[in-house]
Image (spheres, rainbow, N blue to C red):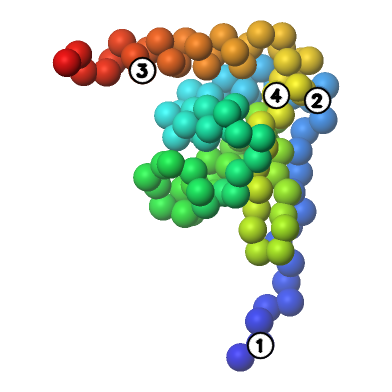
């Protein structure tokens, strides 16, 4: 049976000046999406299926879509793989200090919630 000739829809990313603060904060409110952002803060680019999250592939696709459409990440396709990168420079330009502040607060909260040994 021949493979489908349909292509996936083009990936859309908001321009820097179109990134909305409330969309960014909404995207960062989810623990899975925060994990993705933290990983991308440490690595310049990563293949979508390689993040340390425990969710179904369809759910992970949804999280990437929310992150992409909010302006937090950019994605590109290479053959049959999709790669994600954090739009750190765009976010810093649009909302100076926001990403670092949110990531630091998340780290403090995670540290406080960790079991004491």
Question: Quick one: label 1 or label 2, which is nearer the N terminus?
Answer: 1
Asked if labels 3 and 2 touch by Cβ distance under 8 angstroms, the answer is: no
Which residue in the protein does label 1 denote? Answer: 2
Question: Quick one: label 1 or label 3, which is nearer the N terminus?
Answer: 1
Q: For mark 1, does the 10 Å Cα neighbourhood hold few (<14), some (14 to 19), or many (20 or more) residues?
A: few
The residue tagged with tag 1: helix, strand or loop? loop
Q: Is residue 13 above or below residue 20?
A: below
Asked if labels 4 and 1 touch by Cβ distance under 8 angstroms, the answer is: no
Q: In the picture provided, is 93 more to the left or to the right than 40? A: right
Which residue in the protein does label 3 denote? Answer: 110
**Mark toward the viewer: 1 or 4:** 4
The residue tagged with tag 2: helix, strand or loop? helix
How many numbered callouts? 4
Question: Quick one: label 1 or label 4, which is nearer the N terminus?
Answer: 1
Q: Nearer the viewer, residue 28 or 106?
A: 106
Q: Residue at x 36, y 17 (%)?
A: 110
Q: Residue at x 76, y 38 (%)?
A: 13
Q: Is residue 97 above or below residue 79?
A: above
Cα separation between marks 3 and 4: 22 Å
């Amino acid at each position: 049976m021949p493979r489908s000739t349909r292509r996936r829809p083009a990936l859309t990313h908001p321009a820097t000046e179109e990134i909305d603060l409330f969309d960014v904060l909404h995207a960062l409110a989810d623990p899975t999406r925060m994990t993705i952002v933290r990983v991308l803060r440490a690595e310049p680019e990563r293949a979508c299926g390689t993040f340390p999250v425990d969710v179904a592939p369809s759910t992970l696709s949804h999280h990437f879509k929310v992150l992409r459409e909010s302006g937090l990440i950019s994605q590109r396709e290479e053959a049959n793989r999709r790669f994600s990168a954090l739009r750190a420079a765009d976010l810093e330009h649009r909302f100076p200090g926001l990403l670092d502040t949110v990531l630091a607060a998340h780290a403090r909260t995670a540290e406080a919630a960790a079991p004491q040994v």
